[in-house]
Amino acid sequence: MSRTTLDVSSYGFTRHVRVAARPDRVYDLVSTVSNISRWSPNALHAEYEDGAGPREGAWFRGRNQRSDREWESRSQVTVAEPGAAFAFTVLGSVSVPVVEWRWTFTAHGSGTLVAQSWQLLAADPVLGSTYEDLDRLRDATVDSVEATLTSLADWVAGTITAR
């Protein structure tokens, strides 16, 4: 199948976790993209370009791995609402957004309900060329997101108290 014939609209999901910190604190942790390697089993490194920070339009680069494959990515922040939401798109092989990652932070008791969403935006050969490839990518990403959220909640519980 060619790149243009794959309908990726159904390739997305959201997972949740409760975190023992206020929404503004969890937002600060997540929007500091260099922190992601603390929690994600696939993210090795991320850093804002040119000293940018978590603001709409800012770019950052990342290094990721899955199994024996390692790759670099370039992403642009699309939403930066302190204490509420942080989102970015990842560029594909032809420099168009192919994936959106979105985090939302909702006060829940003395902590936060954190939602992490992943949505394919466009087909790209780097992600796979068949629906079976995309199924495998989605399933591996679900596992990674669940591990990331669990690790984030555990890390916060061990280092931060809800204030």
Image: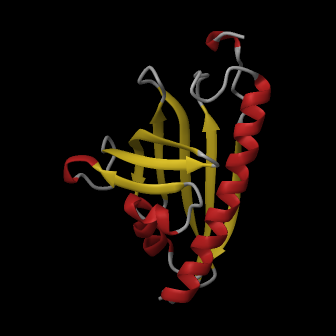
Image location (x, y in percent) of residue 105: 55, 64
Judge whether residue 10 can be spotted in this image.
no
Q: Is residue 152 above or below residue 86?
A: below
Image location (x, y in percent) of residue 74: 39, 38
The quarter holding residue 154 reads bottom right
Q: Which residue is pictured at 38% across the width and 61% down the height? A: 34
Looking at the picture, tell me which residue is in the foreground, 59 or 137: 137
7 sits to left or right of 54: right
Image location (x, y in percent) of residue 11: 72, 34
Colouring used for the render: secondary structure
Looking at the picture, tell me which residue is in the foreground, 63 or 88: 63
Q: Which residue is pictured at 77% across the width and 34% down the height? A: 135
Q: Which residue is pictured at 41% across the width and 56% down the height? A: 45
Image location (x, y in percent) of residue 17: 68, 68
The quarter in which the N terminus is drawn is top right
- Spot the residue most to the front: 68
81 sits to left or right of 154: left
